[in-house]
Amino acid sequence: MLKKILLIFLLLLLTLLFFFLFTAFSLERKEEGSFSLYFMEEKVGYEEYTWQSNERGYLLEVSGRMTKPIALEIHTLSIRLDKSFIPLKYYFKGSVSGVSQEITSSIFEGEVENAILVAGQETKDTTKIRRDAFLLPNAIFSPYVVLTKKFRCQLQEKVELSAYIIPQLEVPFSLEPKEESPCLLIMNIGGIEIELETDEEGNLKSLHIPSQRLKVIQKTSE
């Protein structure tokens, strides 16, 4: 009798475990995208990204390269966020103008701990940023997906936000929908205007920086 009770208990436990794993798996979502980069109307590179979401938060992973206006190789870049789009971790490995770089950052309640390895020399620093600052590494465009995923086509008025140009400095910026075009978001950061086109799902369809003659366009599957 005891053996039967134990067997029933084990079967019930396995059933519950299977149900939990199946539910957790079903909540996992993964999207893939690719951007073509243009400078002065010339194609100068690409970025490929994956956007993953589950009940705990989000993960953006990026790879790619660019030849102009600077030479940039993205071997891997990742940004982990919680469900409120608050950044938790950042990692970059690649090269800028031929110089290898590796950056590892941990963020907790607005305090950032950076470990920066450049050409074999490591430095560490700690800085404070706004807890809800967006991580926007210089000359990498896929992280703007975090902005469009958060606001989609639902922004109704101008908001004042903050960007951490990781790992250098934090700067304020504004974001507002273009009049009568809620899926076109106008970002103004340091006097530079950036146009972000999104959709109802928060996909970044295009990014345009007129003053720098830069365009980023999402590739569409044929």
Image (tube, rainbow, N blue to C red):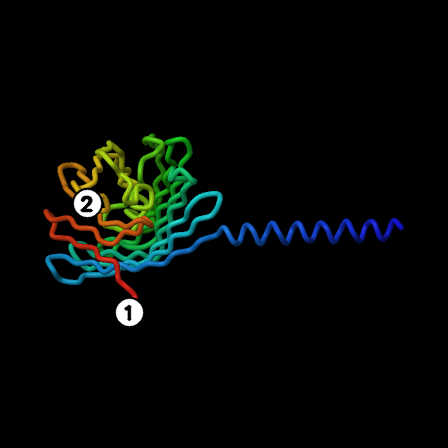
Disc on the earlier residue, 1 or 2: 2
Kind of residue at badge 1: Glu
Q: Residue at x 26, y 62 (%)?
A: 219
**Rendered-image quadrant of the C terminus:** bottom left
Cβ–Cβ below 8 Å for labels 1 and 2?
no
Q: Position of residue 188 (x, y in %)?
A: 17, 38
Q: Position of residue 186 (x, y in %)?
A: 18, 42
Q: Residue at x 36, y 32 (%)?
A: 131
Kind of residue at badge 2: Ser
| Marks 1, 2: nearer the viewer | 2
Q: Which mark is residue 181?
A: 2
Report the residue marked by disc 1: 222
Q: Residue furthest bottom?
A: 222
Number of residues whose C-alpha sits closer than 10 Å to that of mark 1, classed few (under 14), some (14–19) or many (20 or more)? few
Number of residues whose C-alpha sits closer than 10 Å to that of mark 2, classed few (under 14), some (14–19) or many (20 or more)? few
Q: Is residue 72 above or below residue 187?
A: below
Asked if one can make out residue 118 in the rendered structure from this viewpoint, the answer is no
Badge 2 marks a residue whose secondary structure is strand
Badge 1 marks a residue whose secondary structure is loop
Residue 176: name its quadrant: top left
Q: Nearer the viewer, residue 100 or 57?
A: 57
